Amino acid sequence: MSGVSGGGAYDANPAQVHAASLEVGSLSKDLIETFGNLLDGIHSLGAWYGEDPHDSYAQKLKERTGKENKSLIETASAIGKAFELTVDGTIASVKNILGTQSGIVDAIHESGSGRH
């Protein structure tokens, strides 16, 4: 992919970095879809804890379940956003690598032709 070689020179393979970022993007979409399916499953359970307003245990479970579901949704959203930002950052890095490589190649051509 990219990194510093044993001799201290920077080495990058933009195609591999880009391909890896697309794979991470695909995995993040799968993860978000899985979280969505999980939440759909949870919601389909309905009020499994009961609806009797006089059942204090059911009311406590209802409150706790609501908080846990909200936390799960927030966590899933944060994870999805983190993957999205990672992919965006990696693609920006690929563009930077390509720009740097292009600049170096141009400089080599210019110095070889006697232009400065």
Image (cartoon, rainbow, N blue to C red):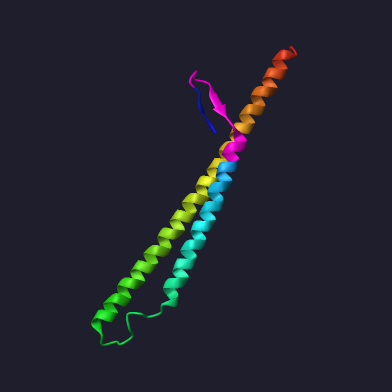
Decide whether residue 94 is among the magenta residues. Answer: no
Image quadrant where one finds the C terminus: top right
Whether residue 40 is visible: yes
From the viewer's perspective, is 29 left or right of 65? right
Residue visible at 26% across and 88% down? 54
Which residue occupies the extreme right position in the image?
Answer: 113
Q: Is residue 2 above or below residue 21?
A: above
Residue visible at 52% across and 52% down? 27
From the viewer's perspective, is 91 left or right of 68? right
Image quadrant where one finds the N terminus: top right
Which residue occupies the extreme left position in the image?
Answer: 56
Whether residue 95 is visible: no
Q: Position of residue 83 (x, y in %)?
A: 49, 50
Q: Is residue 41 above or below residue 110?
A: below
Could you say which is closer to the camera, residue 23 or residue 95?
Answer: 23
Decide whether residue 14 is among the magenta residues. Answer: yes
What range of the chain is rendered magenta?
A: 6-18
Number of marks: 0
Q: Position of residue 68 (x, y in %)?
A: 34, 67
Residue visible at 67% across and 23% down? 105
Q: Is residue 82 above or below residue 95?
A: below
Residue visible at 24% across and 80% down? 57
Could you say which is closer to the camera, residue 4 or residue 75?
Answer: 4
Q: Is residue 66 above or below residue 71?
A: below
Q: Position of residue 91 (x, y in %)?
A: 58, 42
